[in-house]
Image: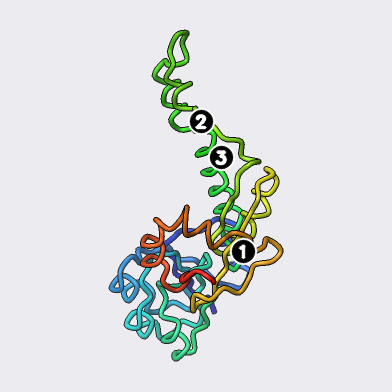
Amino acid sequence: MSFKVVSGIGGADAIKAELARVDAEVVLAPVWTEEDIIKSAADADAVMVGATEPYTRKAIEAMKKCRVISRTGVGYNNIDVNTATENGIAVAIVTDASIDKVSDHALAFLLAFYRKIVPVDRLVRQGAWQLRRREIFEIRVPTVRLNRQTVGVIGAGRIGGAFVRKVKAFGVKVIVYQGDEKGEYRGAPPYGRGVWASFLQNDVSRIRNQILPVSPRYNYFPLPG
């Protein structure tokens, strides 16, 4: 008997070949809305889910044959896990997804910011590299040495921890604030608490209102002490 696996995010040939070994066929279908899921995945044995497809109670209860909802990343806020559990459907995630991709990207942003890569690149393309042009000099002053800076990291999970390991290679001082879901400090060795509280209060306090509404589950405030 063949198994039907519905996916709206496509799939590499390697994934299709691996599932074919257990007599499972990947069926690509538009599943961007609740109605799409009900129409395309009602008879699916399993579904592969991206970050946005709304696997709501209504959608999940319509999938009478489904036994696995496999999220192709870490977050699963678009899946009603309670409803899946009630209906005997296992929800799987990829715990190490995007760890290097996201931490690499954060590091790239950090280097671009300190070396002023983006504005300098724009000026070079505008011809500001020519003699007697001062725009590049003016925009690069001051340019600080990264190995004399302190990098603050909010959260030291898999991605934050990977970023810390990578950025330390540049000789920076790293301080980490790691909170639990109640906003209580629980330490993040071996990086140390250091001057983290004052660092947040003085340098990063302006982003509080941006962080909290976006990620209420990971509320790292109020500050310790």
Of the numbered discs 1 and 2, the one sitting upstream in the chain is 2
Image check: 57 left or right of 68? left
Image check: 131 left or right of 172? left
Which quarter of the image is occupied by the C terminus?
A: bottom right
Q: CA distance from mark 3 to mark 1?
A: 21 Å
Of the numbered discs 3 and 2, the one sitting upstream in the chain is 3
Relative image position of residue 219 (x, y in whole percent) = 46, 71
Q: Based on the displayed image, in which of its 4 quarters is residue 18 positioned?
A: bottom right
Of 104 and 203, which appears nearest the observer?
203
Whether tag 3 and tag 2 are in contact, CB under 8 A, the answer is no
Q: Which residue is mark 3?
A: 111
Image check: 168 left or right of 196? right
Relative image position of residue 176 (x, y in whole percent) = 60, 61
Within 10 angstroms of label 1, few (less than 14), some, or many (20 or more) residues? some
What mark, if any, has residue 158 been given in the picture?
A: 1
Secondary structure under tag 3 reads helix
Q: Based on the displayed image, in which of its 4 quarters is residue 24 positioned?
A: bottom right
| Identity, as a three-letter code, of the amino acid under mark 3 | Leu
Q: Nearer the viewer, mark 3 or mark 1?
A: 3
Q: Which residue is mark 2?
A: 142
Q: Nearer the viewer, mark 1 or mark 2?
A: 2
| Identity, as a three-letter code, of the amino acid under mark 2 | Pro
Of 30 and 114, which appears nearest the observer?
114
| Identity, as a three-letter code, of the amino acid under mark 1 | Arg
Relative image position of residue 188 (x, y in whole percent) = 64, 67
Which residue appears at 45% of the width and 74% of the height? 217
Which residue occupies the extreme bottom position in the image?
Answer: 86
Q: Relative to 27, is 79 above or below?
A: below
